[in-house]
Image (tube, rainbow, N blue to C red):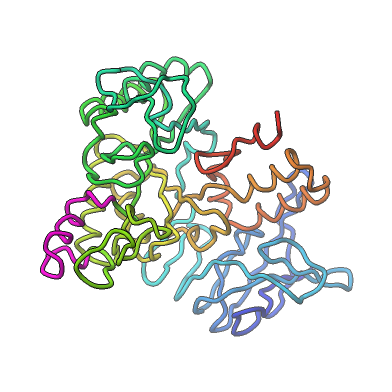
Amino acid sequence: AGAGAEKGAGNAGVVMMRPMQPLATVGTFEYYEADLAIPEGVARGALEAAAAGSLSGSASGTGYVFRIDFAGRSLWLDQHGVKHAGDQLVPWALFLPESEFSRGGESSHCGGKQVRYSETPEWVQDAVFYQIFPERFADGDPTNNPPGTVDWYAAPASDNFFGGDLRGIRNKIPYLKELGVTAVYLNPVFCSHSNHKYNIYDYFRIDPVFGDNELFAQLIEDLHSAGIRVIMDMVYNHTAVDFEPFRDVMENGAASRYKDWYFFHDFPVRLEPPNYECWWGLWHMPKLNTGNPEVENYLFEATRYWLKMGADGFRLDVPCEIPHEFWIKYRRLVKAINPEAYIVGEIWDDGGPWLAGDQFDAVMNYCLRDEIVAFFARHQKDVRQFDTALARLRLAYPPQANRVMFNVLGSHDTKRILTISEG
């Protein structure tokens, strides 16, 4: 058999075919290796995702697929699986400009910056996560409930409050332990006037309706003592209109030192309808200019603060709306403080562009959830179709990312799978 990179969308050339040599047999899987000389202009670096091999040569970043020749016929392997024809191929979304790939070290130099593909947190591989929406989980201290808090068993609405707080979470640690939970994912806990806290006005302070920073530090310590890690939800794309820099622009207009922290169309600032960029057109969530060094410094300083308090990682809200350059620097910052910190992005479709080893460890695996819902809950696929879909998902990302994917059956942004199943 032979293997090589086949010219496809975005490829500048092809790899000369080389015989593949048997390497190992594990169960029903046979592994082969081939040394391939890569011509200038052809991407390489992901053969490790398909077989154990070593690559050498010089190339610029581009898309690629593999062609396998055997028994007088050819098969093509792209990120969606094996195909019997070479048309309509979908190249891997992994780009390694000026890269050198070393099988022994599992590393690459991407744009002059070293990326270690094996460095995803080992503890996540068998972690059992429990998502906590703090406002609706448990009320451990009624004295901090906001005005108008409703009865705990009242009907939930998008804008009402039930009084959940950090002390309520602390009280439930034995319950979490009994369930077998080894990590909790907390929705935002920072200062915000909403119940969901995705419009933040202070990134360094716990919302008083939940508690305070001292109590949060104690919560982290108590969870760690119980063998439970803590992932915090971070919102870097947008803020609240109550955020001090935004308020300053509202007061001072074009003369404000913060006018470049956002994307204003003109002045003075108008809330409804907004004359500035905001998340999904919602006036109360103005979009931050993360390309501004001052904004970046502020957000990175907040990241340092919570990592040093003991956070074990971060779930990143709407990261697809922030440039990749920001996340490349973000990963360096986080991993320099805690190499075992978990970075997971809220990506609803293909997460490949964020999983090349230089940005996220994983993404929220909504693609897997979609397949599970289609097969188990809605009965829209048969077994063969479901199996094929799972195979495509396994091939879509590097194995280091697959081992730590944040697999969900539902979240605060979806219906519960029990509801969908009409259970």
Residue nearest the viewer, comparing 312 with 204: 204
In the visual, does 60 lie left or right of 271?
right
Residue found at the far front of this picture:
272
Q: Residue at (22%, 38%) from the top-left corner?
A: 205
13 inside magenta stretch: no
Question: Where does the magenta region start and end?
Answer: 240-260
Q: Residue at (46%, 60%) from the top-left corner?
A: 107
**Which quarter of the picture shows residue 285?**
bottom left
What secondary structure predominates along the stretch shown in magenta?
Answer: helix
Vertical side of 113 occupied by 420: above or below: above
In the rendered image, which quarter contains the N terminus? bottom right
In the visual, does 329 lie left or right of 70?
left
**Which quarter of the picture shows residue 32?**
bottom right
Vertical side of 311 occupied by 347: above or below: below
Q: Residue at (47%, 16%) from the top-left corner?
A: 175
Image coordinates of residue 170 in percent, x first then y, are 35, 20
- How many labels were placed on the picture? 0
